[in-house]
Image (cartoon, helix red, strand yellow):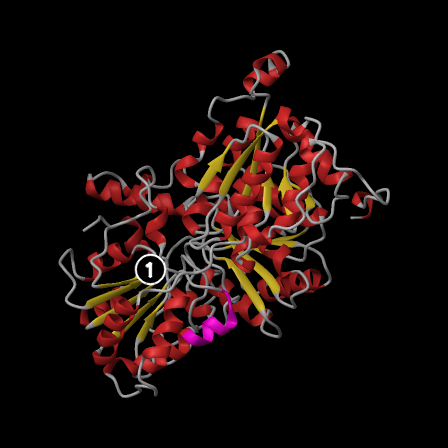
Amino acid sequence: MDDETVRLPEQVRCEWGSDAVAAALRATGVPYIALNPGASFRGLHDSLVNYLGNVAPQLLLCLHEEHAVAIAHGYAKVTQQPMAVAVHSNVGLMHATMAIFNAYCDRVPVLVLGATGPVDADRRRPWIDWIHTAADQGALVRPYVKWDDQPGSVSAAVASLLRGNQLARTHPEAPVYVCLDAAVQEAPFDGEPAADASRYAPIADSAPSEDSLAAAVALLAEARRPVLLAGRVSRDPAEWDRRVELAERLGAAVITDLKVAAAFPTEHRLHRGTPGLFVSPDNLDLLRSADTVLSLDWVDLGGTLRQAYRGGEPTAAVISASADHTLFNGWTKNDHFLPPVDVSLPGRPDVAVAALLDRLPPGDRRDTATSAARAPGGPTVPGETLTVAHLAVTLRQTVSDGPATLIRAPLSWDADHWPVSSPLDYLGGDGGGGIGSGPGMAVGAALALRDSGRLPVAVLGDGDYLMGLTALWTAARYELPLLVVVANNRSFFNDELHQDRVARLRDRPVANAHIGMRMQGPDPDLAQLARGQGLEGIGPVASPAELPCALQRAVRLVRGGRPTVVDVRVERGYGATTAAAITREAR
């Protein structure tokens, strides 16, 4: 933005602690730092503007700390690289915690810089510095960050930032938190600023042992009914192609899901079923029939196998390529059920894929039982009722003249209506199930996709949109092309299903399941809320006849550089598989 262009003198001396921290931040290569302003990091803020010139990194103003982290999360889902985020003292960190948890569960790198009032009590201003100082601020997020630190000097702060950057980027990626003492930021500094972080680079990927690879190859070479579970893998096109090659070499049926980003082409002959948040009954049957299962960092491998085998031990040999175990701790239970694994290939799953391809016999195995053509049937346009399926089909047709990235999809989404053929076609969920993350993640993804030639599209539920909608102001402020379509059923419908189930179990009135769930009387004006923040707002669209023109107009606006929100009034309801999975009991 023109009013944020800073013209600095030819040379600005590094003379404050925060200048040294800012120089170290630039050395890490992060392009942006998202923030909601706060006095606890006023020294760093000044250094980013008046020492670095608001360039590399550039400040991104946000209206809430949770949105700032969500924007960094969305950016990382596209690039698999971190942004920085600054959060103000304990209060800002408490605002940000949900988004940090989401990023941790989703295994994406975020460099979170916090700050505290002076640790030295004699330097605290009356009242305000005391309530904004904590004895152990990192304790607020320690269970769901990869590493945290609160350095006590300028040189220690620089070292902490370089270490945090290294760890956030090292697989498995996750957020880190570095808390900067306000007094350290504002201390005089006469040393040399950090200029190069290359000696503090991410730790290189490790390869599985030769013994483990040999054991995996022996099982896969003999398998007659192999199944490949494609989970958290990379956005790299070459690694995408290697995953396809591995499936073809094995003749393996491939299962994907919607919790993570696109991992395998869904219209490939080896892909099975429709990706969802939960494994479909047909794919659970497929797993039961497998003789070998290869998991590429599948989310909740243990729970999936437990469902497939109805709580019993798998009859298939299980090979797991993952380093996720290195992030487990006793606080958060996103370690899921302990999976039974016959061969472990620790490390980044795409490294294991390349190693397996090098060792497997050449040639495709097209004649195995699992490599039959995918069952016929695809998206069909529903009738006159405006449903999420109707929305998906019409939206897909509207954007079909160019590449688009589906950033987010609601619980009611049917992936049959949005096939994927490349790593950036779909970006997955938020990781931690934190409603309100969608708008911020959409902004971050749009930032990363700017100038890529791809149209950023986020289909959000109305609850997600309303909880996080002020994140969209940042898209308007920095002129980020972004299309947000709200599948507006005017209800927290997920919880209606739960109330319906409880009522049935207790033989109570199912008709009351909507009470305390519906966003009606008055209906929030979602398009007006967007316009109030400087975006384009279209809707509400309430009939199938209106939908094509509304979406076509929205796409024209976005391609012209205008972030746009379309409010689409859809019928309430989920697909049978999703509805059953949401409310079923654990086995």
Q: Quadrant of residue 280?
A: bottom left
Residue located beneath label 1 in the image: 346
Question: Judging from the image, what secondary structure is the residue with disc 1 in?
Answer: loop
Q: Assign the magenta stretch its main secondary structure.
A: helix
Picture coordinates of residue 302 (x, y %)? 25, 55
Please determine whether, in this image, residue 141 is positioned above or below residue 347. Answer: above
Whether residue 44 is visible, yes or no, is no
Please determine whether, in this image, residue 513 is positioned above or below residue 356. Answer: above
In percent of the image, x 30 and y 48: which residue is there?
Answer: 335
Please determine whether, in this image, residue 345 is positioned above or below residue 538. Answer: below
Check if residue 241 falls in the magenta segment.
yes
In percent of the image, x 26 and y 71: which residue is there?
Answer: 216
Check if residue 337 falls in the magenta segment.
no
Whether residue 3 is visible, yes or no, is yes
Q: Nearer the viewer, residue 544 or 565?
A: 565
Picture coordinates of residue 221 (x, y %)? 25, 80
Indicate the amino acid at tag 1. Answer: Pro
Q: Nearer the viewer, residue 305 or 564?
A: 305
Task: Report the span colored magenta.
Answer: 235-242
